[in-house]
Image (cartoon, rainbow, N blue to C red):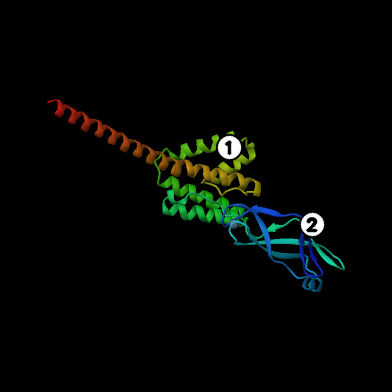
Amino acid sequence: MSIYVNKNNGFQQTETVSRECPHCGAHAQLLPLATPSYEALMDARPGNVGLVYRCAACNEPRFLRAAVRAFEPDRVELSANLAEVERAKERFQYSYLPANLEGLLSEAFACYTAGCHNAFASMCRRTVQTALASLDGSARRRWQDQLRDVLRIGEIDENVSAAIEAVLFADDSAPPQISADQSAVLIEVIKDMLYQSYVRTAKLQAAMKMRRYFAGEAAHKVTSIEGRSRRESA
Ligand SMILES: [Zn+2]
């Protein structure tokens, strides 16, 4: 794909661009909304420019940055490699978490979205510590076992696995330095652990409660029909 700002200020893109939208979550087309003028670009000759698109699904603005490739007599060519200035927000079913955990986890995700991977790692440890403090004594071992299972099933290599386990559970030493790649594994792991312990547990309990309720209703109906038929035959 090539992107041009033509001398007549026509913004020209040879292909459409679709991305996941941080506002509505849809994988939707980006439509150009505010693009730089040819004159302003020729005048200032910046290395990078900002572009505003809108999401075709929800109409919210999307901010992107592109490098300038060439200043030509009749057009300016921009790089097709559009960098998103605003990254997609991580989602979680926060309503299942206790309030203190919800606050910590959403701050952890904000660090991840901002690309602050070590801040993210520290917030993950704090989230785990806070969660374990309010769970039973065996929760720590369960969470560690669960973590090892997830890492093993995902075939995550040993060094990354060791770093992630140290981030989350080695409370007696500072968390190790985390790279962007390790951070991408860490976010999936922490989501999985909290999902298992809070979201899935709550959903299962609700399902069992519902089942018991309907079982009780059914038993009640059977009793009352039997009672009536006994009365009728008497
Ligand atoms: Zn959208």
**Vertical relation: 221 (above or below) 93:** above
Describe residue 219's horizontal placement relative to residue 149 as left or right.
Answer: left
Percent position (x, y) of residue 45?
80, 70
Using a 10 Å C-alpha cutoff, classify the residue at mark 1 as few (fewer than 14 neighbours), some (14 to 19) or many (20 or more).
many
- The residue positioned farthest toward the left in the image shown: 234
**Vertical relation: 43 (above or below) 63:** below
**Quadrant occupied by the C terminus:** top left
Label 1 belongs to which residue? 151
Q: Residue at x 48, y 49 (%)?
A: 93
Name which quarter of the figure residue 163 lies in.
Answer: top right
Using a 10 Å C-alpha cutoff, classify the residue at mark 2 as few (fewer than 14 neighbours), some (14 to 19) or many (20 or more).
few
Q: Residue at x 50, y 35 (%)?
A: 145
From the image, state whether disc 1 or disc 2 is nearer to you: 2
> What amino acid is labelled 1 in the image?
Leu
Q: Residue at x 51, y 49 (%)?
A: 92
- The residue positioned farthest toward the top in the image shown: 233
Q: How many marks?
A: 2
Q: Which mark is residue 194?
A: none
Percent position (x, y) of residue 52?
67, 64
> What amino acid is labelled 2 in the image?
Ser
- The residue positioned farthest toward the front in the image shown: 232
Q: Residue at x 81, y 71 (%)?
A: 42
Secondary structure category for the residue under label 1:
helix
Label 2 belongs to which residue? 2
